[in-house]
Image (cartoon, grey):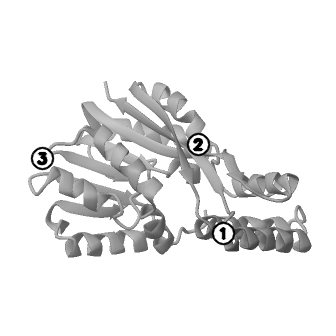
Amino acid sequence: MQRIDPEYLKRTAESKEVRALKARGYDLLQLKPGGKVIDVGCGPAIDTIPLARLVGPTGLVVGVDADPAMVAEANQLAFSGSVGAFTSHIVGNATSLPTNPREFDACYCERVLQHIPWSLNFDVVREMTRVTRPGGRIVIVDTDWATLSIAAQDPLLERRVAAEHALFFANPFSGRYLLALAHSAGLTVVSVQTIALQLSFEALDYLLQPALQNAVRNGRLGVQEVQCWRGDMCAARDYGLFFAHVSTVMLTAENR
């Protein structure tokens, strides 16, 4: 799996649409002061710091990420954000969380399953279930990259580009399967919501670059096609015509 740039994650989290998505997810966790919450795939503390401010100093927030560099940065940011005393980040695998059973009141996981092969998604959700107490809330947010839509002069080329982007993920259609995953883990589903996210030119350009390079290497797209594509996208940006969006699914469940 390609390492995700933490600076990209931070910039994306500042967009209006993603801020609203996160606020909705935090609200659905139903956290209270003194609560305990785990963030699976925490990255550079983007969610753990605001979650810590919800549970307060009598609570506990634990972030788990497979990337040691992300974990180190997250711990530094937690202390600089004055929540380090009750917020920790640890290196771990989402398929085998390094925590005790029923330890947390709530579990949050945002746009992580798309990076994990489909066959392992069941293990990840079962682990979330294992570490959450009965009656605790689990909120999972993930993307269905089949819904990526980009305003382009050549709609056939746009579909090929969108397909290449989807192929670059371990599990590109993860959002549509959250309901099935929750049921397989024995969770009680509270709600399933579809949320449209508008993508900026900068975000989409960053996301597409490795997929387009891979497509050229494998002969599925020509160099000239990719140059034409990017020229059209840059022109759309310069004339204020750039538009792209994708659907994200937010599932809320309670542990039994």
Q: Secondary structure at mark 2?
A: helix
Q: Residues within 10 Å of mark 1 (few under 14, many from 20)?
A: some
Q: Percent from the top left, x then y, of residue 112?
A: 49, 52
Displayed quadrant of residue 216: bottom right
Q: Percent from the top left, x then y, of residue 186?
A: 41, 24
| Residue 205, numbered label | 1
Q: Percent from the top left, x then y, of residue 232?
A: 79, 69
Left or right: where does residue 9 sit relative to residue 71? Answer: right
Residue linked to disc 3:
33
Q: Looking at the image, how many numbered discs can be counted on the residues?
A: 3
Q: Nearer the viewer, mark 1 or mark 3?
A: 1
Residue 17 vertical position relative to residue 235 in the rendered view, above or below: above
Q: Secondary structure at mark 1?
A: helix
Q: Depth check: give the residue in front, 1 or 37.
A: 37
Going from N to C along the chain, the mark reached first, 2 or 1, is 2
Q: CA distance from mark 2 to mark 3?
A: 32 Å
Q: Residue at x 33, y 69 (%)?
A: 74
Q: Residues within 10 Å of mark 3 (few under 14, many from 20)?
A: some
| Residue 81, numbered label | none
Give the quadrant of the N terminus.
bottom right
Q: CA distance from mark 1 to mark 3?
A: 40 Å
Q: Depth check: give the residue in front, 119 or 27.
A: 27
Going from N to C along the chain, the mark reached first, 2 or 3, is 3
Going from N to C along the chain, the mark reached first, 1 or 3, is 3
- What amino acid is labelled 2 in the image? Ser
Q: Secondary structure at mark 3?
A: loop
Query: Are the residues tagged 1 and 3 within 8 Å (C-beta)?
Result: no
| Residue 137 shows up from this direction | yes
Query: Are the residues tagged 2 and 3 within 8 Å (C-beta)?
Result: no
Left or right: where does residue 225 sit relative to residue 9? Answer: right
